[in-house]
Image (cartoon, rainbow, N blue to C red):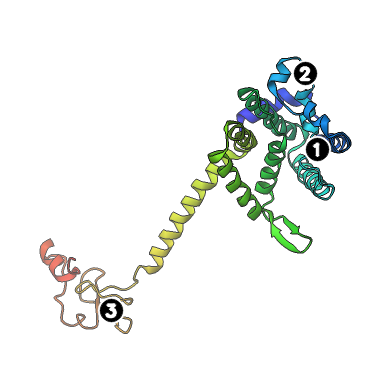
Amino acid sequence: MKLLDTLERKLRPFAIPNLTLILLGAQAIGYVVVGSKPEQAADMVLIMNRVYAGEFWRLGTFLFIPPTTSAIFIFFALYLFWLMGTALEANWGHVRYTLYVLIAYLATLATAALVPDEAASAGFIGLSVYLAFAYLYPHFELMLFFILPVKIKYLAILAWIGIFFAFATGDWLIKGLTFASVANFFLFFGNDIVNRVFSGKRRMEWQARQLRQRNKPFHQCVICGATEKTHPKMDFRYCSKCEGSYEYCAEHLSTHEHVKNDQPESSRQDAGSPPSN
């Protein structure tokens, strides 16, 4: 995609290698800080009115706030983010991966600017990474509760349902954050999704043509229109006395009027054509 290629070239000097590990380190630090001093979270969240008042650190510290304060769930959340983020970075390279995360980050800032009195979350940035991973690796299996293997594409379907529901029922901040979580996804994969839709349509049309071809009869009587499909036990023969390729069923093979090339066109049609429906 030309736009992505242009953005990549401009971002290349500023791209951050191992961005996933950096974000994980920030989340780990944030977990320790928030766990030891919960009141510190209020000074870390992204509230644009506070940024306008001079608290510029909020533009970065909101990324440190962990998605949960549960010790068990934070481990799995950070592990999954590491797994998916490093896979994307290995697939795309650190420049394109940095661009993907940057777009989600900027979209989150834009949303926070539209609702400057409310606190915006970085959780939707992680969600965008999850959606990209599920799209690229749909058959990857996660072990739910260490027992049940589930392909990530099915969990992604649930995530998309949740996104649409949140967008439809949430307030303006939630609407904006859900948009922020999918803006980079559609920028990266929108063209591919459209091509897949049209490719699937063409494949369905091809399959329909193949089905029609399979259902098309091989033998057909030019008099009565009988075929081997409508009359499976019927014999069909070409008449050697007719001038041309005229096939008849057993009932009309010996009773039809032979077609001659010197006959008028209307007579040939009457003698050697199936009845109109």
Up-down relation of residue 274 to residue 3 (above or below) = below
Up-down relation of residue 20 to residue 249 (above or below) = above
| Amino acid at circle 2 | Glu
Label whose residue precedes the other's in the sequence (1 or 2): 1
Disc 3 to disc 2: CB gap under 8 Å: no
Determine the residue positioned at 78% across, 29% down.
42
Q: Farthest residue to the bottom: give it.
A: 233
Q: In the rendered view, does 192 fall on the left or right side of 207?
A: right
Rendered image: mark on residue 237: 3
Q: Nearer the viewer, mark 3 or mark 1?
A: 1
Q: Marks 3 and 2, how far apart in space?
A: 92 Å
Q: Which residue is mark 1?
A: 20
Circle 2: is it few (<14), some (14-19), or many (20+) Cα within 10 Å? some
Q: Nearer the viewer, mark 3 or mark 2?
A: 2
Label whose residue precedes the other's in the sequence (3 or 2): 2
Tell me which corner region of the image, top left, top right, bottom left or bottom right, holds residue 21. Answer: top right
| Amino acid at circle 1 | Thr
Q: Is residue 17 visible?
A: no
Quadrant containing the N terminus is top right
